[in-house]
Image (cartoon, rainbow, N blue to C red):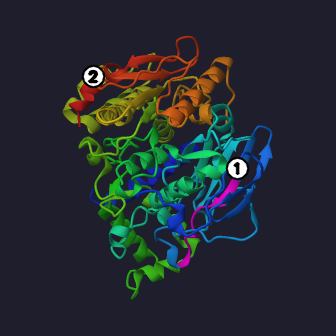
Amino acid sequence: MSSRQRCARAFAAFLAAALATVSTGAATACAASGRTPAVATTGGATVRTDAGSIRGRITGDQRLFRGIPYAAPPVGALRWASPEPVHPWTGTRQATEAAPRCAQNAEQGAASDAEDCLYLNVTTPARTDARHPLPVLVWVHGGGFFGGAGSDYDARRLAVRGRAIVVTVNYRLGVFGFFAHPALGRDGGDFGLEDQMAALRWTRRNAAAFGGDPRNVTLSGQSAGAFSTCALLTAPAAKGLFDKAIVQSGSCSVNYPKNGLAPGLPPYTPLMPREFAETFGKQSAAALGCATAADVLACLRKTPVNKLLPMTQRFAFPAYGTKVLPRRPADVLSGGDARPVPMIVGHNRDEMRLYVSAAQAQQPIDAARYRELLQDTFGADATRAERAYPASDAVAPALAWANVLTDRGWACPTRDDERTLARRAPVYAYEFADRDAPSVTPPTEGFPMGAAHGSELPYLWTPGRFTAAQQKLSDDMIRYWTAFARTGDPNQKGLPAWPRFDGRNGRTQSLAPGPHGIRSVDLTSARHCDLWAKTS
């Protein structure tokens, strides 16, 4: 079983146990900081940031700076506190090795017990020109809010082929990033999002030192990183920190119906009310013997990392009703109050096959089980759903169930957000549709993964084993993404035209390899969004 499948299964197992017991600023100016301003460069392995000089590495056509601190270590009294400024240093700091992953278990890769983890990485072309600063793309990694690291992503192709500055970020995860407790009040629940905002402020202050344009910053992310990006569109304190946004598989309104994340689970959304997280916080304090302490937070802050890590997946979501997210992000979007910036927004054709494959390993979904799930999930609407998504010799019941969940949980809620966002700013919608993409999990007989959750990532970052047609798709996607980072419009000469999304016609760019694989389509009817608008 792959790490992605383990992650999906682990997250589902956690929710099954946990939900049963619970009801359901403007950029900082250098002058204001009192620091030495960052200094623009035109190449070279040494760069002066506002906190001190760093030395990276030049490798062929790229410059790579790894492990740059953007905030003080969130340890001791700073555990579960807003990120503090990084302490300046003298001399030249080495920036050639990846920093530790933020504390996490092994579901998303290597385990880590590091709390001192607020570092980022910068990749640039080997030569930059201060007279012609490059667009800056800040990447927030996925991983369910409890795993992953910025150093997992090789930004060379985006930076070099796309002529961009790429920043990949670590942020606090799980119990360290999204812990809430009544003792924290509205401060709790979103420390990981605050880290991301601190990284954006660092980027505004220091982009020019790497040859980037601090006035042209695009915030982007996939999965948890996409939910973060969407949430920050609604966060008052994030105003002025980025100019454009790319949301890959994680719009604010994405949600799973009953049985959606796994059979037996109640409805779920990746953004939860603060009171929900506080319930887990109180349970955790009791389990650790801190609930009756004179100072609950002081007791918890003295608790060793290895005692907290087993609880990390209880806090695998940002909270709203906090100082960072005063309102539910989906409500902010639907009310037309999200920050109006140009956006690329999209999803993958077969998002939920990753999760259904994990459920399939537990209990195979045959025709009878498929009908049971439809009936239990949609009640009186089950017959209509089965009529729209029939199982057959060509479409196995498990694949039909995955199609139901993808369209109901991902495609149509994302379409709703695209419509709302497009009323106030340019939106370019996409669906990644390469059903022969290199598999993110070991193959399962009778269950092709298709364009599953995360399968677009190799096309932008570290490449997989591509056919010639897939390599061309990868090259075109990189050109689209970096053209958008440059101008707010993904279109450029030599690429198939990508029409701006118009809520009246729902045009979406389908991204697939081969002749006519990249084309504009209307997915509203193909994904049965009218059906799901009338179905719970």
Viewer-proximal residue, 249 or 2? 249
Residue at 47% x, 51% y: name it.
Answer: 11
Q: Position of residue 320 (x, y in %)?
A: 33, 58
Q: Position of residue 292 (x, y in %)?
A: 38, 85
Residue 343 visible within the image = yes
**On the image, numbered disc 2 is attached to which residue?**
504
**On the image, numbered disc 1 is attached to which residue?**
41
Kind of residue sitting beneath label 2: Arg
Mark 2 or mark 1: which comes first in sequence? 1
Residue at 76% x, 64% y: name it.
Answer: 92
Q: Is residue 485 above or below residue 289?
A: above
Viewer-proximal residue, 506 or 484? 484
Q: Is residue 405 magenta?
A: no
View extreme (bottom): residue = 294
Crowd rating for badge 2 (residues with CA inside 10 Å; few <14, some 14–19, many 20+): few
Residue 366 visible within the image = no
Q: Which contiguous range is marked in magenta?
A: 66-76
Q: Is residue 83 above or below residue 374?
A: below
Q: Is residue 335 above or below residue 471?
A: below
Q: Position of residue 530 (x, y in %)?
A: 25, 25
Tell how many labels: 2
Horizontal arrangement in the rendering, residue 252 relative to residue 162 (left or right)? left
Kind of residue sitting beneath label 1: Thr
Residue at 34% x, 50% y: name it.
Answer: 234
Q: Position of residue 358 (x, y in %)?
A: 50, 40
Horizontal arrangement in the rendering, residue 31 relative to residue 472 (left or right)? left
